[in-house]
Image: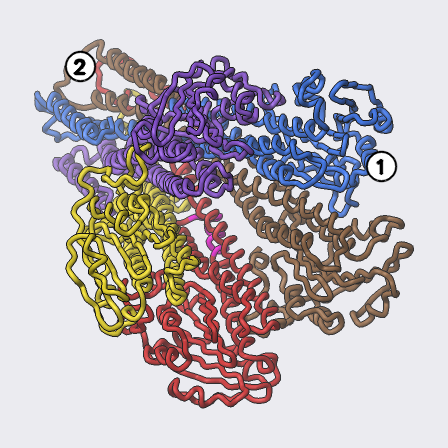
Chain colours: A purple, B yellow, C red, D brown, E blue
């Protein structure tokens, strides 16, 4: 997790815009794919290198260049071929950025963060960077995934809204999908919270508390990602950039609404988990109370009795009681009275 | 409850505006009813399908179309027949939205959330969506209920203010009623808090603490609903939409006041419950203290005595005390002194 | 207290402005008194009904109509005779409002809340509503009290500032008095906190903690009343209404200052009480520690000793020690060594 | 301390501007001293009554009238002789005000609060009020002190900056000194925190916790004084009053910086003390754990042993073991095995 | 650490701008170094005194004067030779300032704070002050270090961006490096948190908790430094000073981004450590529970048994059981039943 709380960084003082990855082997090879489309047609020409891209886009068509993987040379070429600022490329490469929107003359730079539970049950994170040009959208993902499968399907479908509109709508659709991934993630967390609550109300144990600790950590990560996400999407809605058509903004307002809802849920869950932690601690105290009561009841009943039988275990030569015929039964009577008195007192105090 | 903390959602990447309910069977059939009224007359023509509505409204009259239930085809027709934006209909259908107000060219979209205790003692939630057109108000409720019974009665009453005014006043009356439902709900919670407090001050037990936990959860839900509600009503008051007449805004300011009061009460109750939780925890500690004191007093008195009687239970052949005539009485004197000293010490420490 | 945390309310959906009290018997009869004054003279004509008021006010004089009690018919007449908005009268009648200021064309509506300790030691609340017209001030109090005794005396006094100025200064004086009642109330709470602190530092007991709980509740109520009070007085200072002369605003700024000070004190007291609660909890833990140490010391000393004497209480036929002449004294030596070693260890650990 | 958390106040409803002190004997006699100065000369004419002051100031010179003590008649004369508003004088007399700045036509009214540790180790508070006129500065202190000794020395020194400039620079110098007193105060608190931390990390005891409680209270008082102080100095910096020359504002910005630093330190200290309180509570729990472990180890080892020796202390006539020659040694072996097994188990659990 | 929470200060009332260090020996000798550069050439002429500097800078070249150490006479000369305001120099000398930016006519004054873990594992702090003139940058560091080694290397490198641009870019590079030092520092803290978490989840001990306490203190210090840092860098970005070229601001926005990320991380870490502290406390309670259960189980099993064997250790002459042949075996049966019953009960309660 540490990798993701702190973004990747170079030694302080390094030239800004340096692309060589600070962690050895962090940048595998990139896979490029290109979609060019107009309302009537869509083509997905194979593309091996960034240098081919411009030539592959027919005039008047929209194009989506999808880069998966952070190969240094590929990202570097974005600077020279598309005029992207070196600091932007540094942010693309050094994952762990806050979600943000930056407006440049010829393009918008958007960073969003997707958090999903992986098949191993751990919360996985993927940074998605978008560069929105006039008729070209470049996206950079960290690694292969099914994140945008549905969006690609919608793009391939004849006659859908997506093909009618320009790449800014496509960018919206990708951001929308990225934000919407928080809902199933939070639903899973909600289910986990419910399970933990049931256990804590029924039979609190240490494992549930550690589970709660893990849930809180996950919520902390989601929170760290979603507050700036709201800011970023809000900035998109308010931006006066001509790269975003007015019609697209209606849709973005809906995404903004979703980010606000996500934050609401995260905060509600955080309060719930805090509440459950308090419940657990009170349970522990309660059980301790129970244990102590049992100990006290037992000790308080048997200590006086043991003392009494100890008395008549003494070997004094002059102990008149020992010779009485009714001595032994009398001791039993006394002991039963003592024990009964104790039990009566405990009952009155509600300890039994 | 989970259903309501997170709104209904489709798989990320789905086309926005998709109406098919994401949860199988979530959308039962809808029941439609129509009220058309002018100061002089009110009629409630039976209406079977949305397609009939426009024809049923006499010219120059106000109309209220009330839809109960989220039938997909009915909601879908709102888009084609009344020009409602698909995203709006998606928000109507996917319950669990934050209360909000959205302003469109021809209509205002208002979502409010009503939380009431049901007959089973659980907090039930119902989302009410309002679409306010020039002379037509469309409302969508989740299911049949008596929510707006009093409002309907006022509408049917001859000569009341409601018939004199246009549908925006009717919309106000519905929002006002929805907000006012929080008062009895909070009064019930206030009573529950009082009951729990009485128990915790008198004789704290685990059940009350779990009841407190439940109350806190309910407050969390109400809080999640009311903060955005205030925002939404505030937006209504400040809106420059011509669909809301200036006269209606005076009334809406009163509703805004109510939302602020509701939030005040919720926050006060949250502090009270937190305070009661602290009280409970301190009670548990106190009782533990009591239990431990009893144990300690008993053990501290009887352990030395048991030791003393043990001494004279030893079988050494050469123990001069055993032969003394006054040995036994002397041991009793010693033991009474020890026990008395202990009791005196405990009294001085205030443990008895 | 519940009555005051939640304002009085009607069933949701009731026509706004309904005056019949929602709680049976909540509205007793009202007592009216009228003061008309100019710099030179003051008269207090008896007044039996609202209908007489206008005729009783000499032209060019200032008038203060004081209504004590919420008689429905009297309050209702305020609408018809003085043109007060029905929602305003509803707020006057349904006590438990947030302090607020509302500006209408012909009058200002001001609600303030006074919290004082009653003779029974409980915190009593009274809502005071002011309607400030051009030359007429109408005030509505909940019940008879000595709240404004000093203000009335100043009004009756010949030559004071109050008679020279118009009713807006009188309104200021009433609001000022209402706000100033928080100082003695808070002073009493401060004294209570000091008493509790002394007890908690000296000899913490459960009763003090419950007293602290009560103080916290009182502070919560005062807080709930004073934050909106600050807002309301601030609104008065900033208002551009011509009903408040510029000269009066200098005085109102002073009242605003007082509300800020009250809030400062309330927040400081809240922190203090929280701090004392922590102190109490740590005291409980500490005393538990003390108790446990005593128990442990006693048990750790006497258990080994009891074991030793138990050994020589066994009845084996072949126990050589029993026959030794020095057996018994030797056992004493061993036991003294064991006990001494334990005491030495406890001393080193600082448990004694 | 109570006196200072709540400002002095009159009964609610008293005429504003009343000067008679609400607490009997709160106003001793005032001592007046006057400094008149120009770049070339400084004179300190003796002054017995306010009425002499105006005559004592040479034309074209700056003057500082220093009043120490709150004699009612002296303060009252400020109204008649210098045209000070009665509410201002009330604020001067009723100490316990929030630091503030109020701008009047002919003068600025500044209240600051100095908190210093007295020789008795308690935190003392003194309110300093400044009335800044065109060429006259009037200051009112509560009682004699060495607060402004260094400033007076600088004023007396020939050729210093202070004599060159007008009274607004002198006012700055006084406010600067008042603010700077927080640094040594906070340094002392920092040292106290360090001492407490060392004790709590090394050998936590109750006294340190009570010391921590006292530190927290002191911090609360300082906090209550410094937040409004920042506001007040900020208002001075931003004021457009001509009484403050532009050149003086550069210096005031430095004072503002200091108030911000003071608040930073106070907040940091508050977090530190909270942190230390948590540390203490965890220490108490830990020590309790230690105590309990000792008790449990001892009890768990000796209870079975005592039971075993008890068995062979029984007096049954038919107990074959008692007659065995090796019976007694065998019991020892069993007891050593039991004790050893317990010790081994405790070691494995890490309790020894 | 205390030195750094509170800035160095003089006695209250001292003339502002006093440079003599308030702490004896706090100001060692200063070392000066000078870099003059243009795109084509860089020279580093030796410089012994401030008086030589101006002469050493070739016309039209950029110059960086680096002062290491706070020698009073050197700092004082900055006032006379470069027209720096005395308050600025006071802030340079009295380390422990909040990071800030102050804009003067001829220069910008920037204070930043670097926090790094030293070789001794303790968090070291260094204040770096920058004075940015038109073509001259003066920096003052507290002591020799490798802070800006990489920046110096970049400056020395032929053809890099730094030589092309003016000193404002150099100032940016230094601030950027200073800010970037927080990333490795926080990464180390993140690793420490992970270590502590692993220990606390596995086998909580007191030492880890004290380690956590230390981490929290470090975070508190970093927090105290970074919030104002963000403000300061934000002010740099928004400033309209001509000393910062528009091109440089793009880079500064990147630094601002970094400060926001640093604060995000610090806040996340603070929540994590708080969470871990709760986890520790719950662990302590849990272990106490375990210990108590062992004690209770042992006591509850052996106390009744010891009582039973005590009975038959009594010496009454008339105890029929003692004479029974099956008496002894019967007692064993009873005792086994009692012990078995206890074990069964504990198992059912889940205490074993």
Position of B42 with respect to B287 (left or right) is left
| Residue D321: numbered disc | 2
Q: Report x, y in % for residue A251.
A: 38, 41
Number of dots carrying numbers: 2
Q: Residue at x 71, y 38 (%)?
A: E242
Q: Nearer the viewer, residue B196 or B40?
A: B40
Q: Quadrant of the N terminus of chain C?
A: bottom left
Residue C74 part of the magenta segment: no
Chain of the residue under the numbered disc 1 shown in the image: E
Residue E141 vs residue D6: left or right? Answer: right
Query: Tag on residue D255?
Result: none
* SS label for mark 1: helix
- The main secondary structure of the magenta stretch is helix
Number of the front mark, 2 or 1: 1
Which image quadrant is residue B310 in? Answer: top left
**Residue C194, magenta (yes or no):** yes
Q: Residues within 10 Å of mark 2 (few under 14, many from 20)?
A: some
List x then y, in percent, for residue A65: 43, 23
Residue E217 shows up from this direction: no
Q: Which residue is mark 1?
A: E80
Graded by Cα atoms within 10 Å as few (under 14), some (14 to 19) or many (20 or more), the crowding at tag 1 reads few
**What range is drawn magenta here?**
C193-204
Q: Where is residue C266 drawn, in percent x and y?
A: 50, 56
Judged from this view, the residue extending furthest toward the right is D40
Name the residue at 19% across, 37% down: B24
């Amino acid at each position: 997790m540490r990798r993701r709380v702190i973004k990747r960084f170079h030694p302080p003082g390094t030239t800004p815009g340096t692309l060589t990855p600070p962690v050895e082997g962090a940048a595998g090879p990139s896979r490029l794919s290109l979609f060019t489309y107009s309302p009537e047609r869509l083509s997905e020409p194979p593309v091996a290198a960034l240098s081919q891209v411009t030539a592959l886009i027919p005039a008047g068509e929209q194009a989506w260049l999808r880069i998966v993987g952070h190969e240094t040379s590929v990202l570097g070429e974005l600077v020279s071929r598309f005029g992207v600022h070196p600091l932007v490329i540094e942010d693309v490469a050094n994952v762990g950025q806050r979600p943000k929107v930056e407006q440049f003359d010829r393009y918008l730079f958007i960073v969003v963060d997707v958090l999903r539970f992986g098949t191993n049950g751990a919360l996985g994170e993927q940074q998605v960077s978008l560069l929105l040009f006039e008729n070209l959208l470049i996206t950079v993902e960290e690694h292969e995934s099914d994140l945008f499968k549905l969006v690609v399907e919608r793009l391939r479908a004849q006659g859908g809204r997506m093909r009618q509109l320009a790449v800014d709508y496509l960018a919206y659709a990708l951001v929308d999908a990225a934000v919407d991934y928080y809902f199933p993630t939070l639903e899973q967390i909600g289910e986990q919270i419910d399970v933990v609550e049931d256990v804590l109300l029924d039979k609190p144990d240490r494992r549930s508390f550690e589970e709660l600790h893990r849930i809180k950590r996950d919520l902390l990560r989601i929170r760290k990602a979603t507050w700036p996400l709201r800011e970023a999407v809000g900035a998109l809605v308010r931006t006066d950039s001509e790269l975003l058509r007015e019609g697209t903004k209606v849709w973005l307002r809906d995404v903004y609404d979703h980010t606000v809802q996500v934050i609401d849920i995260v905060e509600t869950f955080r309060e719930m988990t805090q509440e459950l932690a308090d419940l657990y601690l009170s349970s522990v105290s309660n059980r301790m109370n129970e244990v102590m009561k049992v100990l006290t009841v037992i000790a308080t009943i048997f200590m006086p009795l043991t003392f009494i039988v100890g008395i008549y275990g003494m070997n004094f030569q002059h102990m008149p009681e020992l010779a009485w015929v009714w001595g032994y039964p009398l001791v039993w009577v006394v002991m039963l009275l003592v024990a009964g008195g104790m039990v009566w007192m405990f009952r009155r105090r509600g300890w039994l």
